[in-house]
Image (spheres, helix red, strand yellow):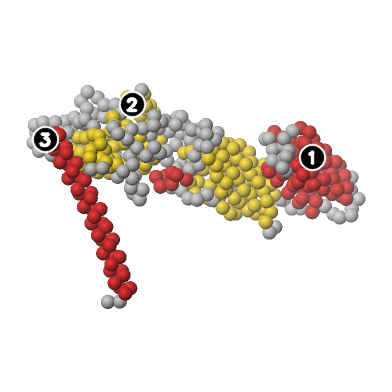
Amino acid sequence: MKKSTLLIFLLSLNLFTIALSAQSDYEQTIIDIKTKLKVEYGKNFLITIFNPNDVENLNYFVQDENNLLDSCLVFLAYEYYEGDIGSPYNLIGVYKNADILWHSKQIINGEIIVSGGSNFYKDLNSDGKIEIVTGWLKSMSATQEDLWIVSCDGNTGKVVNNYDENGNSKIQTVTDSYEIIDVEGDGIFEIKAKSVTDNTAIIYNWFDNTIGNIQTIAPVIIPRNYLTVKVSSEVSRSNDVLNYKYKVYNFRNSIQDIESFCIASNVPKLIIDKKPNNWDAFNVRHKEAIRWNVKFPIEIYFDYLIKPGKLNDSFVLKGNFLPIITKYYIQGNNGKVNIYLSDIFINSKTGFTIGQAEVQMPLDKKSHMDSLINYTQESLKYGWIENEQTKNKYKNYLITAKNYLTEGDSTSARNELQLVLNDCVADSSTVLTSEAFALLYFNTEYLIKQLPIGEK
């Protein structure tokens, strides 16, 4: 046998052995749980187990920041039941280190359950505990799914969904239709579901550390602007190309993580030079804008959202277009990535930053000068120029240069504009931010190049 063939055979055998070992561990865990429940209740159970630590399983949504379910398995137990007498037992439990760490009392009293699932694990109400969301079906063709939710502190658990006197959960939804989202933008995650009676979108709200008693109609727009943010931008030149770099800060008092950043521009298609790891970037159709968005699905890429107290500076564009003042839009995450991309323009945190603009040729020099004069006033308003005195200095340079230009004295206008360039460099580390520098320096530099030489 060739060495390469032997190597492939041994590798395949090793993978097969690992797979058998994993299957054996899975089966042994089920047997162990069955045995322990049989001793406790004298009943036979069917067991389904779920591993919230399986990061490769795309079916799981896990945000366990306190590692409360570390090395744990979640199991659902259904009493193996035959006959018409008795009340079937159904349980939720947590298994760790070959022992049942905790399990619930009997739930869904008197109902024979054929299927259940658990794939959502997150602290929903910001109490430091992790909620285990489970869904239960009463037949294989069931159109109704009952949700049971357990709050776990790492050692013990408690059922936190409301239920009626017959043991039926008050959180009922059309099968596979529920979402876990922050409806009010307050850091508390509710359950959005479809009503089993008329398919209306409803919200199950929290009250006094339980969820399910209070129902409200789901709002059309769910807020994504509960953010305190700052965007800083700087423009630099490299090989006759301008690079636009943006830093996006999400302050500690923000309730939401940042999932999307968008900049308006009057350039139809911008060149994207850099994007954050595991983010997408694209020009927005039917809008003159560029957008960066964390990849979908959120179950995989949640860690790449910009968390409160963090910043990301991997947003870079390039081109030969001049700096202008433009609007930015930042959208927070409320439990899932926003698939309705256009609502960022109506449901986001907004402010102003530096963008790019095409220059209309031939250049209207006086109009361009008016834009520069306006930039001094706007820069003061946005805090990009530190004080009125500095604003007046640049404004006076520009007004004087415009007067020279009106008189046909391009040489004197050029000299006055050169003062703008010189002072921009000198002031860039003190009274001008990178935004004010970009607006005044590169626009003035371009204007100087358009002026005739030696004309008075």
Residue 138 picture quarter: top left
Q: Secondary structure at mark 3?
A: loop
Is residue 364 visible in this depiction of the protein? no
Residue mark closest to the camera, 1 vs 3 = 3
Q: Residue at point 29% right, 72% down? A: 6
Few, some or many residues within 10 Å of mark 2 (<14, 14–19, 20+):
some
Residue mark closest to the camera, 2 vs 3 = 3
Observer-nearest of 343 and 447: 447
For residue 394, the mark is: 1
* Residue for badge 3: 42
Few, some or many residues within 10 Å of mark 1 (<14, 14–19, 20+):
many
Observer-nearest of 2 and 329: 2
**Residue type at the position of mark 1:** Tyr
Coordinates of residue 260 in the picture (x, y in percent):
51, 43
Q: Going from the N terminus, do you reach mark 2 or mark 3 first?
A: 3
Coordinates of residue 196 in the picture (x, y in percent):
29, 33
The residue sitting at the right extreme is 456
Spatial CA distance of label 1 from label 3 is 87 Å
- Taking the image as shown, residue 335 lies to the left or right of residue 93, namely right
Q: Going from the N terminus, do you reach mark 1 or mark 3 first?
A: 3
Q: Residue at point 48% right, 43% down? A: 305
Count numbered badges in the picture: 3
